[in-house]
Image (cartoon, rainbow, N blue to C red):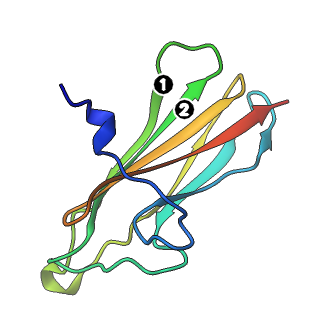
Amino acid sequence: MEKFGSLYQSGDWKGEKHVPVIHISDKVKKEEVVELRVNIGEEIPHPNTLEHHIKWIKVYFHGEGDKFPVEIGNYNFTSHGEYGVFTEPDLTIKFKVEKSGTIYAASYCNIHGLWENSKKIEVE
């Protein structure tokens, strides 16, 4: 049986326009509100047309020692040219965290499928 995780692609976001780019400090303070930004196509713009677009971005936090990750954000980009309106695959989430762990971001391109990236953060 093929695992769902094997369907995800990754790469260096500086050379691949589909990889989610995660912006958050490497170190954050316990229980203080932190800002996380995730976008697609930072170095190489991703097309944003009805024919080729990013459908969604999901963001998870997996704390050290935790069995499962927690979904901290889920955004669907639903306008791809209707009446001249185009949503951009760029989001900001504010949250608090109590321990160190890893941020995971996943995205879906309607032509090129599933993409992922991750970044470790340390809680002080």
Q: Residue at x 61, y 23 (%)?
A: 63
The quarter of the picture where the C terminus appears is top right
| Residue named by callout 1 | 69
Question: As drawn, is 94 to the left or to the right of 51?
Answer: right
Amino acid type, label 1: Pro
Q: Which residue is tagged 2?
A: 61
Q: Which residue is found at the position 15% from the left and 77% from the top?
A: 50
Residue 72 or residue 8, whichever sits in front: 8
Q: For the view shown, which residue lies furthest in the bottom direction?
A: 84
Labelled pair 1, 2 in contact (Cβ < 8 Å) = yes
Residue at x 18% of width, y 81% of height = 81
Question: What residue lies at 77% left-to-right and 34% top-to-bottom?
Answer: 122
Indicate which disc residue 80 carries: none
| Position of 109 relative to 86 (above/below) | above
Disc 2 is placed on an element classified as strand
User: Residue 30, how many percent across, how many down?
Assistant: 78, 28
Q: Report whether 70 appears left or right of 32.
A: left
Q: Quadrant of residue 46?
A: bottom left
In the image, residue 59 lies at what x, y percent?
46, 42
**Mark 2 Cα-neighbour bin, 10 Å: few <14, some 14–19, many ≥20:** many
| In the displayed structure image, the side of residue 71 where residue 7 appears, left or right | left
Total labels: the figure holds 2
73 left or right of 83?
right
Regarding mark 1 in the picture, which secondary structure is present there? loop
Q: Where does residue 115 sit, x and y in percent of width and height?
A: 37, 53
Q: Nearer the viewer, residue 47 or 70?
A: 47
In this view, which residue lies farthest toward the front? 1
